[in-house]
Image (tube, rainbow, N blue to C red):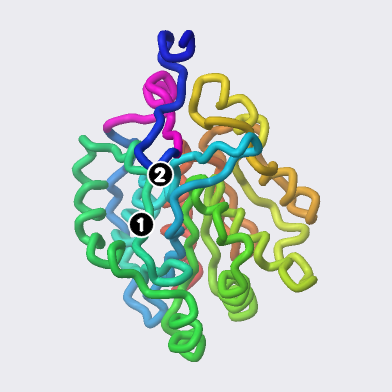
Amino acid sequence: MLKKLFGIAPKLESDGSYSPSKMALKMSVSAKTDFENISYEKYKGKKSKILVIFTEQKNLEMKNGKMFSTGNHPVEALLPMLHLRNAGFEFEIATPTGKPVVFEMWAYPSEDEEVKAIYEEHKSSFEKPNKLSDFIDTSFTKTESYAAVFVPGGHGAMIGIPEDVNVSKILNWAHENDLFTISLCHGPGSFLSTTLNNQKFIYEGYNMAVFPDSVDKKTPMVGYLPGQMPYGLSEKLKSLGANLMNTKMDKTVCVDRKLITGSSPLASNELGKLAANTLLKELK
C-alpha cells in the first residue's frame, strides 16, 4: 500500500505481468528524445542492408517469479535506425519465429515526430517480420549485400534470444564475413548465443558497452523492475572475456573491430551516430 501511495509500485497488467511504476516512468521515460538530425553523405554501395533482430516475446521472469512487461526499447531501436537510414542504409526486420516485434510501448516517446515517423515507416514489417531461419536459408549466400546486424536493447532481448541457435548462426556469420555487429543496453545478451553447444565466445577480448548489473539491481527499489533480474548480463559477458567500458547507465559507446556497442537508452543517439559514421567510413 505504501508503494502505491508513493507511486513506486510496479503496474499490474491484464496478463499478470508488471510494467514500471509511475515514479520509474517519470524518472526514465521522456516524451522526446535527444535525436540529432544529421545530414550524412549517403552510402551508395552494394552493402546497403542491415538485419535487425528484434524480440517477439514480452514477459521476462524475475528471480521472485514475477513477470516484467518488456520487449525491445523503442528509443534503443529507432534512434540508431534513424541515423543509419539517414546515412543511406535499409533494414530487414526479423524475429526468431516471425511473430510480431514486441516493443516496450510504455517507453515510446509520444511527442518525438522523427521517432514516430520511422516507427510508422516500418510498422508493417514490425507486424509481419521475417523469421531468422528464413533469413539464414535465403541471405547467407548474399553476404555482399549486407553491412551489419543490429540487435536493439530492452530487457526483452534477454528472452529466448541468448538461447537461440539461429541468433548464434547469424552472429557467427556476421563475424566470419567481416560484417558489423551493432547492439546496446541489454541487446548484447544476444552475444551469449555464440557460446551455445560449447562454442568459443566470439567476442572474447573485445571492448564493449553494456547495461550495468549494478543499475538493474537498484531499479526494483523504484518499481521499474518487479524483482531482481534472473542473472547479471554484464557480469556474464565479463566472465566470458569481454572488457566492459562502462560502470554506469550513461552515454558510453564503443567500437572494437567490427563490434559497435552502447551502454543504455541514454546512448541511443550516440550509438546511432557512431554506427552511421563508422559504416560510412569503413564501407567506402
Badge 1: few (under 14), some or many (20 or more) residues near its Cα, within 10 Å?
many
Instruction: Examine the structure image and report whether residue 182 is included in the region drawn in magenta.
Output: no
Which is nearer the N-term, disc 1 or disc 2?
A: 1
Q: Mark 1 points at which residue?
A: 81
The amino acid type of the residue labelled 1 equals Met
In the rendered structure, find residue 269 and report the number of the disc placed on it: 2
Instruction: Look at the image and tell me in which quarter the C terminus lies.
Output: bottom left
**Disc 2 element:** helix
Instruction: Give the CA distance from mark 1 to mark 2.
Output: 10 Å
Q: Residue at position x 40%, y 28% from top?
A: 11
Residue 189 pos. (x, y %): 61, 54
In the rendered structure, find residue 205 and report the number of the disc placed on it: none
Which corner quadrant of the image does residue 217 belong to?
top right
Determine if residue 116 is in view.
Answer: yes
Is residue 162 found left or right of 281 in the rendered image?
Answer: right
Residue range (magenta): 17-31
Q: Residue at position x 36%, y 47% from top?
A: 74
Residue 276 pos. (x, y %): 42, 59
The amino acid type of the residue labelled 2 equals Asn
Residue 250 pos. (x, y %): 54, 33
Image position of 13 with respect to 270: above or below: above
Residue 153 pos. (x, y %): 49, 49
